[in-house]
Image (spheres, rainbow, N blue to C red):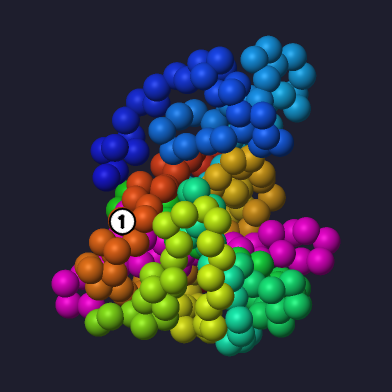
């Protein structure tokens, strides 16, 4: 799967993408995003809403090279609750949305981030010393003023794994179409491994518009699902992972 991601992208003509008249251009993992536009003759910056995917110097994901890691003093504390969530298929992943009233929060030092949603990539987007995991779950959080922090949980699927009940809850209701929005009573805490050790760096959204200023915390401890659970997810989405982006001088910290 890594070789597929490394394959040279085919240049898609602007004409081919201009048939969709939506606020944001449709995108896939099989094309470069920076040239996608809703207009046949882009003339201004806003005609290329995903330009940052190419121009940005702090993009995600990255290769977390442990050799370059240094000690960070930031500590994470999660307080997620069991509540009624909504599962959607957004055309790129299976995503679990939190209600706007949620009290599920992540504390980073004295700062409080509210959990907005979590979703799944297979294989993982972050790689550790060049090695991808079977999958990665992203827990996306925001402060009231829009500062983003994402906790990445790497997922292994060894033959010896026990069935992951919390992951199975998502699989059991995950819609194969873009319209159904089943409810799910779930506790995101049960998908978390130990949060004591993690990699930390400044990056971006890994999907268009690739907005930067995202604080990334990729946990060192993986969780496990069974190979059958991985196969079940991959029946919905596989290779929905952006390849590792250049660090461009950024430092990866580790705790
Ligand atoms: Zn993601």
- Position of residue 6 measured from the top left corner of the image (x, y, whole percent): 33, 34
Q: Nearer the viewer, residue 55 or 117?
A: 117
Q: How many marks do you count on the picture?
A: 1
Residue at far right of view: 145
Residue lying at 50% horizontally and 48% vertically, measured from the top left: 91
Membership of 156 in magenta stretch: yes
- Position of residue 69 measured from the top left corner of the image (x, y, whole percent): 47, 59
Callout 1 environment at 10 Å: few (<14), some (14 to 19), or many (20+)? few
Q: The N terminus is located in which quarter?
A: top left
Whether residue 164 is situated above or below residue 86 in the rendered picture: below
Span colored in magenta: 132-161
Q: Answer left or right for 251 relative to 157.
A: right
Q: Is residue 193 visible?
A: no
Q: Answer left or right for 91 relative to 203.
A: left
Q: Is residue 11 visible?
A: yes
Residue lying at 23% horizontally and 68% vertically, measured from the top left: 228
- Position of residue 247 measured from the top left corner of the image (x, y, whole percent): 51, 42
Q: Nearer the viewer, residue 156 or 174?
A: 174
Residue matched to label 1: 235
Main SS, magenta residues: strand
Residue lying at 61% horizontally and 67% vertically, measured from the top left: 97
Membership of 245 in magenta stretch: no
State the SS at label 1.
Answer: helix
Residue lying at 47% horizontally and 20% vertically, measured from the top left: 12
Question: Which image quadrant for residue 227?
Answer: bottom left
Question: Which image quadrant for residue 229?
Answer: bottom left
């Amino acid at each position: 799967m890594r070789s597929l991601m490394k394959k040279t992208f085919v240049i898609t003509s602007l004409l081919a993408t201009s048939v969709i008249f939506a606020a944001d251009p449709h995108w896939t993992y099989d094309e470069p995003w920076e040239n996608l536009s809703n207009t046949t003759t882009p003339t201004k910056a806003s005609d290329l809403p995903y330009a940052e995917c190419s121009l940005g110097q702090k993009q995600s994901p990255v290769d977390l090279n442990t050799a370059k890691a240094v000690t960070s003093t930031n500590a994470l504390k999660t307080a997620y609750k069991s509540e009624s969530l909504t599962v959607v298929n957004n055309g790129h992943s299976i995503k679990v949305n939190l209600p706007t009233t949620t009290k599920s929060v992540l504390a980073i030092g004295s700062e409080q981030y509210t959990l907005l949603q979590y979703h799944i990539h297979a294989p993982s987007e972050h790689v550790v010393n060049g090695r991808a995991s079977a999958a990665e779950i992203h827990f996306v959080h925001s402060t009231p003023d829009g500062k983003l922090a994402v906790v990445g949980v790497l997922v292994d699927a060894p033959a010896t794994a026990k069935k992951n009940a919390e992951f199975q809850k998502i699989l059991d209701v995950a819609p194969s179409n873009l319209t159904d929005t089943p409810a799910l009573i779930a506790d995101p805490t049960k998908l978390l491994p130990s949060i004591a050790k993690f990699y930390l760096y400044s990056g971006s959204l890994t999907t268009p518009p690739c907005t930067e200023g995202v604080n990334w915390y990729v946990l060192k401890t993986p969780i496990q699902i069974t190979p059958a659970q991985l196969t079940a997810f991959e029946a919905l989405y596989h290779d929905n992972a952006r390849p590792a982006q250049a660090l461009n001088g950024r430092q990866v910290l580790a705790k």
